[in-house]
Amino acid sequence: MKVASVLIPLPVPEAFDYEVPEAFDVARGDQVAVPLGPRLIRGIVAEARETTGSNRRLKAIDHVLDDPRLPERTVDFVEWAARWTLSAPGEMASAALKGLRAPRPRPERRVRRVGDRSPARPTAARTAVLEALGQRSMPGPDLARAANVSSGVVKGLLDEGVLEAIEIEAIAAFDAPDPDHAPATLNPDQAAAADAIGAAAAEGGFKPFLLDGVTGSGKTEAYLEAAARALRADPAAQVLILLPEIALTQALIERISHRFGAAPAEWHSGVAPPRRRQVWEAVQAGRCNIVVGARSALFLPYVNLKLIVVDEEHDGSFKQEEGLVYHGRDLAVARARIEGATVVLASATPSLETLWNAHQGRYRWLKLGARHGAAVLPDIKLLDLRENAPDPQTWLSQPLREAIGETLLKREQTLLFLNRRGYAPVVLCRVCGHRMTAPDTDSWLVEHRYTGRLVCHLTGFSMLRPKACPSCGAEDSLVSVGPGVERVEEEVRNLFPEARTAVFSSDTVPDGKSARALIQSMADGEIDILVATQAAAKGHNFPLLTLVGVVDADLGLRGGDLRAAERTFQLLTQATGRAGRADKPGRAILQTWTPEHPVLQALAAGDRDAFVEAEMAEREAASLPPYGRLAALILSGENAQAVEKVARELAEAIPNAERLEVYGPADAPLALVRGRRRKRLLVRADRDVDLQGFLRVWLSRVKVPASVRLNVDVDPYSFL
Ligand code: ADP
């Protein structure tokens, strides 16, 4: 008898076995319909094998779906990713089918003549239609316009059977990129990097690289040249470039179109589903060479993947926290290993994990020197707020105000960076001290002035700003505490009413289109002062920007989780790196209450190595990543007792293990979200411990009731 293991999109730990009817021929990667209870559901064949009879009666595969087979290595990848993240393999597999589930683009409707049929009453209008059409096919409205008649005339001819309606399928054509279309002349560092990566990708085999160079040193230029070499060696080669933010894709797509004379495919949640289906099919059929996308593009069914680039590899946005929990950068390295491909992690501020791998010699370390051409790194100055405190209820110190004024006079641009959305992060009652909090979540409400609402940034809950304090009832007693970008913009408008000022945050630019428009008007010099959250700190090129002011350089340092210092260093390096990219020198001013902080000292000195060395030493002393590994278990549920019970059972079921500790269970820092109680456990293990194996044994010992959710987060980035 033939049996197939089938991955089905359910939270179950293994594939289900089904009998394969004699007439069917199935292999790994085939899509099949299988019975599950009373329903038929879509599954992916993980394995088909002969058995000599089974003592269980298996249900049979219902039929093989007329959909493309997933490439074998794509199945290898989803199975590996599921094991690594402790996710259900069927759910991981369904991430690889996302594009296929979307509807096809609507076919185009056209009309054409039926044989030589003529109208019974050939009016002038009807004759004009038939003459305009000739033997071609045309969309009905175009035909009416061409013949200068109303659409009713065309419809009349359709009704009479003189014309017929036809549909034409749209197949997406991805023009082949031309590696020699518009190559850049690389400087020696760039050429050496492009050579090394390009040769590796052309040769094949798993080869990981760290491409390390300051913002503007030409990392993009170098990896595009490497892609060109891979394409010269094999015109069917596929190249995947991952970016952390959708807002960055457009600029790269334009650069690639310019460099290769053909637009790459774009893949992220902002791409319309019918288009995603076209990309999926083209990637699976090998009709598409270059894909630019967000982390989910890792799950596309590549057939000849030669090169993966993870640009801004240090960026926390590569970690997906909802649904399937995975780190896009880590899975990119795994995918490259499975595909036998080259992977490039590019950054001006690599993550400590990646630096560690480079130090160990696991990744080949390519360094790019100074900025390309005349551009030099900005001069960074720490501004001690203890000596230059801003006036009450303002946030910009006198020296920063003066610098903005000077920049305006020179007709250059200023970026004021504050990583806080809205107007004020806290609203409280001046009479009773009540803080405005969300009703069902442990978070303070953030005031947004544009909309007049108080918003929970965690859940999206919002309410109108009340007139009276909900706690003591005092009228007009609520005060806004602290600044967000909207409040800094208000201050800037008061100080420089003649300047053209704008705010860049996920509230003012909610989608890719508005982000592109704002980035373009900044690049065109139509904005003098841009007040921005981290959304604008990354990757963009603003030639006239010469001053970056960091409103609160201490902000990220206060959080105190594992990566607080690392993240702050990276973010502020990115933000200050925006200044002076073209021929004009730039400067950055960081407002701080703690200028002696090592992170800020390293930033001001432009000494990344000093920062990395100090931070690595701390991590090593505590055996924390990258010297050790972490995993978090997060329990949540509406019933506090049920959550408590599972937490207790987990604590009692911890398997014996050496060089591994379990902390908790404890209330999560966010102990209540959307009415659900949350508890956390944290596992720390030495690097050589089989952490996933430990977790599998542990979790198999505890039965979690349906009312409680257990999320496993391997290598967690959020500790909330
Ligand atoms: P990074 O990716 O390291 O931030 P980019 O590749 O975006 O750097 O380069 C920064 C700027 O310098 C871009 O405008 C790019 O076009 C330009 N540039 C870099 N290298 C070259 C080169 N070899 N020839 C021409 N322009 C270059």
Image: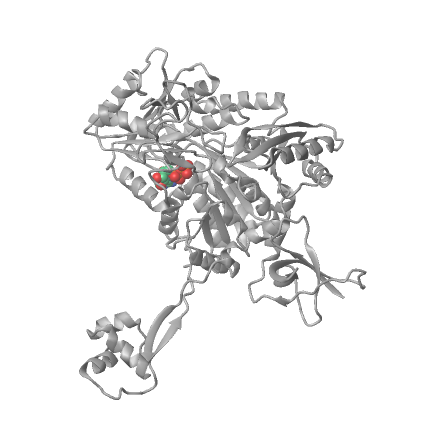
Is residue 561 rendered to the left or right of residue 6? left
Is residue 353 rendered to the left or right of residue 148? right
**Residue at 66% across, 42% down:** 705
The percent coordinates of residue 636 (x first, y second) are 59, 36
Which residue is nearer to you in this view: 321 or 398?
A: 321
Among the 4 quarters of the image, the one containing residue 448: top left
Among the 4 quarters of the image, the one containing residue 151: bottom left
Q: Which residue lies most toward the bottom here? A: 120
Quarter that holds the N terminus: bottom right
The percent coordinates of residue 349 (x first, y second) are 47, 31
The percent coordinates of residue 6 (x first, y second) are 66, 58
The percent coordinates of residue 413 (x first, y second) are 27, 31
Looking at the image, can residue 592 be seen? yes
**Residue at 44% across, 20% down:** 600
**Residue at 52% across, 53% down:** 300
Is residue 15 rendered to the left or right of residue 69? right
Tell me how many marks there are.
0
Ligand 1, image quadrant it occupies:
top left
Against 275, residue 307 (above or below) is: above
Which residue is nearer to you in this view: 291 or 44?
A: 44
Against 417, residue 80 (above or below) is: below
Looking at the image, can residue 585 be seen? no
Quarter that holds the C terminus: top right
Question: In this figure, which colouring scheme has been used for the structure?
Answer: one colour
